[in-house]
Amino acid sequence: MARIGITGATGFLGGALVPRLGAAGHSLCLVDDRSGPLYVAGPDPPVLALDFASPEAVRELVACDVVLHLGAVSGVMACAQDPAGSARVNVEGTRTLVEACRKARVPIAFASSFAVVGKPDRLPVTESTPARPTHEYARQKADGERIVRTLAGPEGAASAVLRMSNLYGTYVRDGRTIAKGNVISLFVQQAMSGRLRVNAPGTQSRDFVHLDDVLRHWEAAVGFLLRAPPAEAPTFCVASGESLSILELAHVTSELWTAERPDAAPLAIDVVENPRQGIELIDPEFSVDRRETERRLGVRCEHDVRSTIRELLRAGAASGGRT
């Protein structure tokens, strides 16, 4: 079993991943400065409340066999509102961590996003699609990818970039349901009020991947890095291949709502102004081919959007409308 360092260990993804890695027998070094909007932590092991690029945190992380770099100022709007401050964390902080890992020859897996591909010249997106970011969050993630890839080489260690698509799903920690804000959970909440609000134009397409499938990719990435030669620096598509437009997703939610509640009024679907207009790319044809990731990591996606929405709607009915 390995010793695994995890930055951003108490965020949404870290809070779900930590117990799984612990249950698999790994020892863990957890780092999180608790500056994010969500704090999810278990009783063991203790979390180092430090900036991941601080000397104290780096010293602990480079003593590990592999580092999973989840820590970041995350989100399109957060980076747009404070580009300099977020870049200090996402770019310069990542550079500091990678340089320390190079000296110690510790491999890193980096949490990236499909936002980095911008508007690709060719679809579907694959592992080799180049980064062409169009907004600040994507630019910082693309910079992080480039920095992490410099780790690979005879004087360094292997690295891996995990580009994640739109993550959905929940988990329970200490009796509390932990959910990430996304359009699927938002539509389920809105369904209880009888109206779904779709950001214009609604034809924008997204790949949706379930949390459980994401976690299995990260677990597989640990195994990959522990056995990979130092020249390895692959990009993995942490995506399901299941792409839906936001309007299609609204209609699926409405259809399942009616199936679960045949006596209820049909849901209204309103197309409303998009608060991310001019920042968020609108691509109705977006799709992902993840075959190379599946071949190299040996992970298949097992969940689908329709089944998850049905489960969430049923859970909302069982809780009297609270999701």
Image (spheres, rainbow, N blue to C red):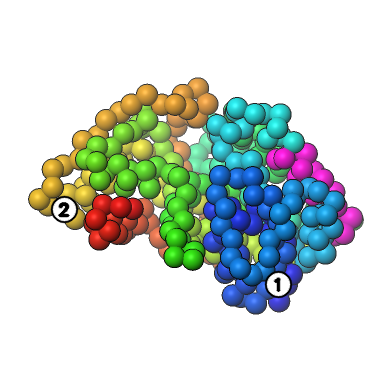
Residue 124 seen by the camera:
yes
Residue receiving disc 1: 27
In-front residue for pair 219/92: 92
Q: Residue at x 16, y 42 (%)?
A: 266
Q: Residue at x 37, y 30 (%)?
A: 199
The relative height of residue 55 versus residue 205 in the rendered view (above or below) is below
**Residue type highlighted by circle 1:** Ser
Position in image of residue 137 (x %, y %): 61, 34
Magenta segment, which residues? Answer: 89-106
Q: Say what secondary structure mark 2 lies in.
A: loop
In-front residue for pair 322/165: 322
Q: Say what secondary structure mark 1 lies in.
A: strand
Position in image of residue 191 (x %, y %): 26, 44
Q: Residues within 10 Å of mark 2 (few under 14, many from 20)?
A: some
Q: Which residue ends up furthest to the left in the rendered image? A: 263
Residue receiving disc 2: 261
The relative height of residue 92 versus residue 215 in the rendered view (above or below) is above
Does residue 91 show up magenta in the picture? Answer: yes
In the picture, measured across the screen, residue 292 lies left or right of residue 63, that is: left
The relative height of residue 53 versus residue 212 in the rendered view (above or below) is above
Choose top left, top right, bottom left or bottom right for residue 267.
top left
On residue 89, the disc is none
